[in-house]
Amino acid sequence: MKDLWWDDEFLKFNFEFENVLRSGSIVLPFQAMPESVRVGFIGPYSLAYTPDIPINPKSLKDIWLDLRRKFPDRELQVRLPPELYHQDLFKANFETLCGLGARILYQDLNFHLDLTGNFLDSINRNRSREMKKRSLRNFMFLETSLEDAYGVITSNRIGKGLKPSLSREKLIQLHSLYPNRVRFHGVKQEGQVVSSSISMVINPRLTYVFMWGHDPSIPTSAESISTLCEGLFNNFKGEGVQFLCLGTASVQGIVDQGLNTFKSSLGAIKTSRVTMGIPRGL
């Protein structure tokens, strides 16, 4: 199975055709903004990649140079993947960019669950208390529909004054492209979905929880996130997945202490996600 971020259909879904450079086996999707060119800001690691191992350093350098020549008057911003994923590719891109004059702009905290263990062994005391109360709350984890999952997440984001990072129409389109890789789960209470998640199966080892949340209009729904996380943990572990990515707890290096504490309480492991920059004209 090819990485989802590296699939041609996923590239077409996220990028205009002319915004994908190729050099040998290396592919570099990018976003051209008025003042900058951005790489790696869609998905955890949609940077310069190749399925070939070992990586050809010359082709990698050439493709970054091609991008600089194409947009000499714009700043280049590159968000590298979390350290956990494709370490050879991470190192090769980091070293190549440093050689071209890039500097670290900021580092974000990324979280993942190691599914080789046991969920209940790694959570903290608060989450353990929630798990002990799940039967009293009648929480039940299950697969759910796109509409139910997206409805809860929309309510959650509206309650925070935000909007979902992917529109309903785009999610329907993505699910139609990858019906077996875009997955919907939730927790029901008395027949109503009170929390939900939308996950993407990136490759056989890694699944990314792209969006999740609880319905703030239901008083006990926040407690169901622990049940949701355990369900995701056991479900994907049963499918042979090794790592469950829970995303970040910071924005441009500024840590959201609430998210940091919450994801840590679920037993999630922190890794660094580096964003680099090359000023215009270099």
Image: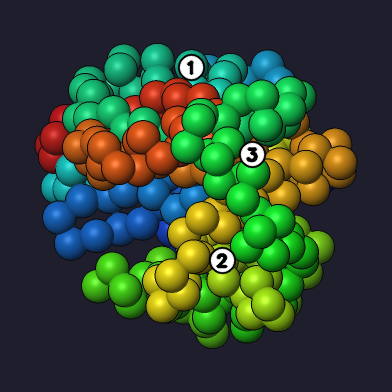
* Contact flag, marks 2 and 1 (Cβ < 8 Å): no
Q: Which of marks 2 and 1 is in front?
A: 2
**Residue 253 placed where, x, y %?**
23, 34
Residue placed under numbered mark 2 in the picture: 195
Asked whether 128 or 187 is in front, the reply is 128
Give the mark, 2 or 1, whose residue is nearer the N terminus. Answer: 1
Q: Distance between the Cα atoms at labels 3 and 1?
A: 22 Å
Q: Is residue 98 left or right of residue 105?
A: right
Decide if residue 125 is in sight here.
yes
Name the residue at 46% across, 75% down: 218
**Residue 68 placed where, x, y %?**
29, 39
Residue placed under numbered mark 3 in the picture: 244
Q: In this view, does 168 lie to the left or right of 238?
A: left
Is residue 32 depicted above or below 251 in this figure? below
Q: Nearer the viewer, mark 3 or mark 1?
A: 3
Residue 177, by quadrant, is bottom right
Name the residue at 68% across, 32% down: 119
Name the secondary structure under disc 3.
strand
Residue placed under numbered mark 1 in the picture: 91
Amino acid type indicated by mark 3: Leu
**Residue 165 placed where, x, y %?**
41, 67
Amino acid type indicated by mark 2: Ser
**Residue 93 placed where, x, y %?**
45, 24
Q: In which quarter of the image is the C terminus?
A: top left
Give the mark, 2 or 3, whose residue is nearer the N terminus. Answer: 2
Asked whether 239 or 29 is in front, the reply is 239
